[in-house]
Image (tube, rainbow, N blue to C red):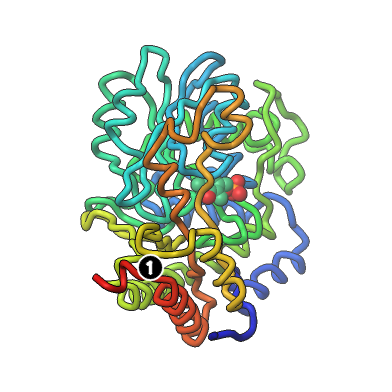
Amino acid sequence: MTSGPFIPFALPDLTSAESDAVLEVLRRGWITTGPRAKEFERRFAGAVGAPHCVAVSSCTAALHLALEAVGVRPGDEVIVPTMTFAASAEVVRYLGAVPVLVDVNASDHNVAVPAIERAITPRTRAIVPVHFGGVPADMDEIVALARPRGIVVVADAAHAFPSEYRGRNVGALADVTCFSFYATKTLTTGEGGAAVTSRAEWADRMRIMSLHGISRDAWKRYMEGGSWYYEIVAPGFKYNLGDIAAALGLAQLARAEAMRARREAIARRYDAAFAGREALELLAPAPDRTNAHHLYVIKLAPHLLDIDRNRFIEELTARGVGVSVHFIPLHEHPYYRETFGYRPESLPVAHDAYLRSISLPIYSAMTDEQVERVVEAVLEIADGHLRASATAR
Ligand SMILES: *Cc1c(COP(=O)(O)O)cnc(C)c1O
């Protein structure tokens, strides 16, 4: 059995560039929102192709601010794919609105456009496509459904920096697009997030609500030239991103393309190694979009193997390979089951994908040796557990 030191499922890629940037902020002494955060907003907006960027404390905060700014109100419905993280739907509940969970495509685990179409009602206020694993959802079709009905599209791009869809940058596809800079994401600020948009009034509203509903550059009030006077125009939140985090983000941004290229090389190696293994199904995103490669998912073909997904994970763990599952569909969690009456089979594609999925490690700090150990472990388990009937064929 191939074994060795534990390979974590995810690790941030931090170099001396990041520590130097953080230390520089500490030496200057302005550690909350300030010049670094403003510079990060400018640069990140440019990197994703959007005119306005509001940097905040998490993607969850960005999604909350975005839905508030576009006018989601109590009783409204917001369509969310079930194959996502808690954040995408809980923010809908923050606003007293109803998340309507819908199924995904088997091919890429992105939201299924026909499922959105069936879920639209006169109460639908917004759609939240999630760019699963780093591959943009079917945005032209989604926007074409939304626009004529006055429905707003707020994309959850927590996985998708950097990526493109039909030649357009990921920040230019939805009305508002939200990113995560959590420790495991493709760019990290430790904790952090951002909302980008081309609509100045939504950007203004998100900026104001991100800092206590205080109008006019509240973050400047303790700076030279800042004013002690401020006005509260709405009961806002405390979601600002500080300069320590922003400095880390700026250093990561400068390395984003190199980190993406490394993840792509790992994905290519996995693709080549697993191709032709019928027991291992791979996602097949459409060729008209690029992949930020935040996740690498394999789906087991249960009829070809004599072990199930959970046993497969135990075998990987025994070989020192850290893995995860993305995601336990939201509709299968107790809160959503009990509140909205879903059963696992209510959204059958996501349910089936969940039972068969394993996410393998894919991050730029992985060494070639670690990648080879993951490949060997997966193949050893898959080949060693082929059903007799499958081997005989
Ligand atoms: C990580 C994640 C989030 C939340 O990001 P935070 O920055 O931790 O709030 C939202 N949506 C998806 C799909 C995620 O994977």
Q: Position of residue 41 (x, y in %)?
A: 52, 51
- Residue 144 is left or right of residue 128, and the answer is left
The quarter of the picture where residue 318 lies is bottom right
The residue tagged with tag 1: helix, strand or loop? loop
Q: Position of residue 70 (x, y in %)?
A: 47, 25
The quarter of the picture where residue 161 lies is bottom left
- Residue at x-position 60% and y-position 71%: 317
- Residue at x-position 33% and y-position 19%: 150
Residue 194 shows in this picture: no
The quarter of the picture where residue 356 lies is bottom left
Q: Position of residue 344 (x, y in %)?
A: 49, 35
231 and 388: which is toward the camera: 388
Q: Position of residue 122 (x, y in %)?
A: 37, 12
29 and 168: which is toward the camera: 168
- Residue at x-position 35% and y-position 21%: 120
304 and 116: which is toward the camera: 304
- Residue 266 is left or right of residue 21, and the answer is left
Q: Quadrant of the N terminus?
A: bottom right
Placement of 139 over or under 100, stated as above or below: below
Residue holding disc 1: 387
- Residue at x-position 47% and y-position 30%: 202
Q: Quadrant of the C terminus?
A: bottom left
Q: Amino acid at mark 1?
A: Arg
Residue 176 shows in this picture: yes
